[in-house]
Image (cartoon, rainbow, N blue to C red):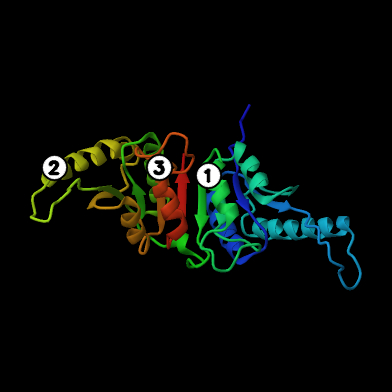
C-alpha cells in the first residue's frame, strides 16, 4: 500500500501576505509532489456595540468563506492539474488551528502578517506563535519581499553552530538549494572573549586565528553529510566575528531564502525558539525557514 506523502500546509486569509505564502507553498508542493492543504481559521469575533444595518447569519459567512477557499483551490488545480489540493476552514484561533495542522505536515508556509496584523509589525502574532510551537519546519514569507522571491537564483543561507537543530536546518537548506539550482552559504559566527582595561591589557588570552580555524572545521563537519547527499549543490562558508543574528540579517538582504534551527547551542533548554531565530524571524528581508 502506497503511503500518501505529508502535505504542505499554507495559512490563508486572503491578505497579500497569505497570497504570497500560497504561491510559495504551491511551488513547493509541485516540486515535492506533496498534497497542498490550504487552511483558513474561522474565528468568531463578538462585538458588543450595536452594528448598523442587517446582521449576516453566521452560517452564511461560513458558506461564503468555504466558496472563497474552493475558488482559490480550483484556480491552482487549473494551473497544476497533477497537484492534489485540499482546503480546510477550521473553527478556532489561527495560531491553534495552524499548529494543529502542522502535526502531520512536512512544512507550514505563512505570510509574516495577515489581515488582523498591526501595520507597524514586521511579523504578526500568528507567525510568531506557529514558528514557536509547530512540530515541523515553518517558512515565513515577509510581507515586503518581492512576490516571486522564491524563483530567484539567490543563495540559500543557513546558520551553522553545530547543534542538532542546526544539522536539520542544513539538510533543509541543501534540499532547497538543489531545487533552486543555487548554492548554499553556511554562516557561522563567534564572539571574541576580549575584556580589555583602559591601558589596553587583555584579561583573556585569545587566539583569533585558532578560533577561526576551529570554526571552519565545525562548519565543514556539520555540512559534510548534506553536501555528500547533494553532490550537485555548491556551497561556501562565511565565518564572522560578532553576533550571529546580525550576520544572518545582513546576509538576508541578498539571499533568496534564510534557514535557521529553532534553537542553537547557546539556547536555554526550556525555550522553544532561540534568540537568534527570533531575531532573524522579526527582521529578515527574505523568506525564512525555521527548522526543528
Badge 1 or badge 2: first in the primary sequence: 1
Rounded to the nearest angstrom, the CA distance separating label 3 from label 2 is: 33 Å
User: Mark 2 or mark 3, which is nearer the start of the sequence?
Assistant: 3
| Residue 169: mark in rendering | 3
Q: Is residue 26 visible?
A: no
Task: Say the numbered circle drawn on residue 204.
Answer: 2
Tell me if mark 1 has few (under 14), some (14-19) or many (20+) residues whose alpha carbon lies within 10 angstroms of its own: many
At label 3, counting other C-alpha atoms closer than 10 Å, the crowd grade (few under 14, some 14-19, many 20 or more) is many
Q: Position of residue 158 (x, y in %)?
A: 35, 48
Callout 1 secondary element:
helix
Query: Taking 137 as reference, is 277 left or right?
Result: left
Q: Which residue lies under the disc numbered 1?
A: 132
Q: What crowding class fits label 2: few (fewer than 14 Cα within 10 Å), some (14-19), or many (20 or more)? A: few
Image coords of residue 252 (percent x, y) = 37, 60
Mark 3 secondary-structure assignment: helix
Q: What is the distance, in whole Å, between disc 3 and disc 1 at their CAs?
A: 15 Å
Residue at point 83%, 62% (across, down): 48
What is the C-alpha distance between the residues marked 1 and 2?
37 Å
Asked whether residue 232 appears in the rendered view, the answer is yes
Left or right, 50 with reference to 217: right
Residue name at image x 13 percent, y 52 percent: 197
Amino acid at each position: 500500500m502506497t503511503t500518501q506523502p505529508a502535505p504542505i500546509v499554507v495559512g490563508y486569509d486572503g491578505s497579500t501576505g497569505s497570497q504570497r505564502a500560497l504561491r510559495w507553498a504551491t511551488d513547493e508542493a509541485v516540486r515535492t509532489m506533496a498534497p497542498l492543504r490550504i487552511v483558513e481559521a474561522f474565528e468568531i469575533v463578538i462585538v458588543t456595540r450595536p452594528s448598523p444595518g442587517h446582521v449576516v447569519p453566521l452560517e452564511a459567512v461560513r458558506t461564503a468563506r468555504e466558496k472563497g477557499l474552493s475558488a482559490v483551490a480550483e484556480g491552482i488545480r487549473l494551473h497544476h492539474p497533477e497537484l492534489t489540493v485540499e482546503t480546510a476552514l477550521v473553527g478556532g484561533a489561527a495560531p491553534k488551528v495552524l499548529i494543529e495542522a502542522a502535526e502531520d505536515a512536512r512544512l507550514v508556509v505563512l505570510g509574516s502578517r495577515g489581515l488582523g496584523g498591526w501595520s507597524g509589525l514586521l511579523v504578526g502574532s500568528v507567525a510568531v506563535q506557529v514558528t514557536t510551537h509547530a512540530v515541523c519546519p515553518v517558512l515565513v514569507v515577509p510581507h515586503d519581499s518581492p512576490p516571486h522571491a522564491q524563483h530567484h537564483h539567490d543563495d540559500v543561507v543557513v546558520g551553522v553552530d553545530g547543534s542538532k537543530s542546526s544539522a536539520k536546518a542544513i539538510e533543509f537548506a541543501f534540499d532547497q538549494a538543489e531545487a533552486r539550482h543555487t548554492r548554499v552559504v553556511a554562516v557561522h559566527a563567534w564572539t571574541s572573549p576580549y575584556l580589555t582595561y583602559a591601558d589596553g591589557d587583555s584579561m583573556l588570552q585569545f587566539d583569533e586565528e585558532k578560533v577561526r580555524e576551529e570554526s571552519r572545521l565545525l562548519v565543514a563537519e556539520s555540512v559534510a553529510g548534506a553536501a555528500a547527499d547533494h553532490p550537485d549543490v555548491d556551497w561556501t562558508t562565511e565565518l564572522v566575528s560578532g553576533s550571529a543574528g546580525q550576520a544572518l540579517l545582513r546576509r538576508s538582504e541578498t539571499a533568496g531564502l534564510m534557514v535557521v534551527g529553532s534553537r542553537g547551542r547557546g539556547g536555554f533548554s526550556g525555550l522553544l525558539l532561540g534568540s537568534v531565530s527570533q531575531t532573524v524571524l522579526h527582521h529578515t528581508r527574505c523568506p525564512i525557514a525555521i527548522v526543528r
